[in-house]
Image (tube, rainbow, N blue to C red):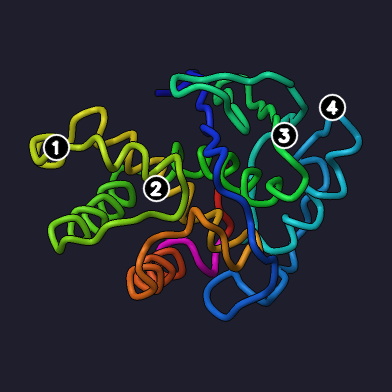
């Protein structure tokens, strides 16, 4: 999937309800870490929003990522909020300001997923598989829920491309729920007990260290 454009599809009937801090990993506390030069905004109007969200993220490290706007973005599933070009280290946005924190974190975590390593990716996949096997429905973003609804038991068993894409999108949507500061959203349909388990996974696997992107 390296080098392909990852588009975050829009669910036009859903919208954020409230932005607020909450308890849990990455919520309610700013991280003290330098981010100067990590994100380069081609559109200066994006810079303040990026700076606010970065205070909520764990420390990140890597080569600069350029961010900009691209009206009319479209992906495999139609109109998209954003698209990420991993090899070009570039993120393009076409979303409303209220959605930007959630969408920004989602796209940044595509870079995290790419560098997370097979062990971490497999571990998160096992967490998702246990949810599905337990009859858990819902997700933490439309991008993941759309793919989850198309999965078969064979996809999960054989770790097919649809399964791997679902794991990636679920990882990014979970990060967006966890770190964006958006407390409630119509796309947050996963059961609260599962949200807690995912938050603990992120805290265990990514907490307390600098994350490569």
Residue at 39% x, 41% y is 168
Question: Which callout, 2 or 1, points to the residue nearer the camera?
Answer: 1
Compared with residue 135, is residue 170 higher up or lower down, i.e. above or below? above
Confirm whether the magenta stretch covers residue 160: no
Question: Which callout, 4 or 3, points to the residue nearer the camera?
Answer: 4
Tell me the distance, in whole angstroms, between the alpha carbons under discs 4 and 2.
28 Å
Instruction: State which tag comes first along the sequence, 2 or 3.
Output: 3
Compared with residue 57, is residue 13 higher up or lower down, i.e. above or below? above
Which of the 4 image quadrants contains residue 176?
bottom right
For the residue carrying disc 2, how many other residues have a C-alpha within 10 Å: few (<14), some (14-19), or many (20+)? many
Which residue is denoted by mark 1 in the rendering? 152
Tell me the distance, in whole angstroms, between the alpha carbons under discs 2 and 1.
16 Å
Residues under numbered marks 4 and 1 in contact, where contact means CB atoms less than 8 Å apart: no
For the residue carrying disc 4, how many other residues have a C-alpha within 10 Å: few (<14), some (14-19), or many (20+)? few
Which residue is denoted by mark 2 in the rendering? 170
Tell me the distance, in whole angstroms, between the alpha carbons under discs 4 and 1.
41 Å
> What percent of the width, then of the height, locates residue 69?
77, 26
Compared with residue 44, is residue 208 higher up or lower down, i.e. above or below? below
Q: Secondary structure at mark 4?
A: loop
Tell me the distance, in whole angstroms, between the alpha carbons under discs 3 and 1.
38 Å
Segment tinted magenta in the rendering? 205-209
Q: Is residue 11 left or right of residue 104?
A: left
Which residue is denoted by mark 3 in the rendering? 64
Question: Which callout, 4 or 1, points to the residue nearer the camera?
Answer: 1
Tell me the distance, in whole angstroms, between the alpha carbons under discs 4 and 3.
12 Å
Which residue is denoted by mark 4 in the rendering? 42
> What percent of the width, then of the height, locates residue 108?
60, 42
């Amino acid at each position: 999937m390296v080098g392909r454009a990852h588009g975050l599809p829009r669910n036009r009937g859903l919208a954020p309800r409230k932005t607020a801090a909450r308890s849990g990993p990455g919520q309610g506390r700013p991280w003290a870490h330098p981010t100067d030069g990590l994100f380069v905004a081609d559109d200066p109007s994006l810079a303040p929003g990026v700076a606010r969200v970065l205070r909520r993220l764990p420390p990140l490290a890597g080569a600069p990522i350029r961010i900009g706007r691209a009206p009319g973005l479209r992906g495999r599933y139609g109109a998209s909020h954003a698209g990420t070009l991993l090899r070009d280290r570039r993120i393009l946005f076409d979303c409303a300001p209220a959605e930007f924190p959630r969408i920004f974190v989602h796209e940044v975590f595509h870079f995290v997923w790419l560098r997370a390593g097979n062990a971490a990716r497999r571990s998160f996949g096992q967490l998702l598989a246990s949810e599905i096997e337990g009859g858990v429905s819902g997700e933490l973003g439309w991008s993941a829920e759309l793919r989850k609804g198309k999965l078969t038991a064979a996809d999960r068993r054989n770790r097919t491309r649809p399964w791997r894409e679902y794991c990636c999108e679920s990882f990014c949507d979970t990060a967006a729920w966890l770190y964006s500061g958006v407390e409630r959203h119509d796309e947050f349909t996963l059961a609260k007990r599962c949200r807690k388990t995912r938050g603990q996974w992120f805290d265990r696997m990514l907490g307390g260290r600098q994350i490569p992107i």
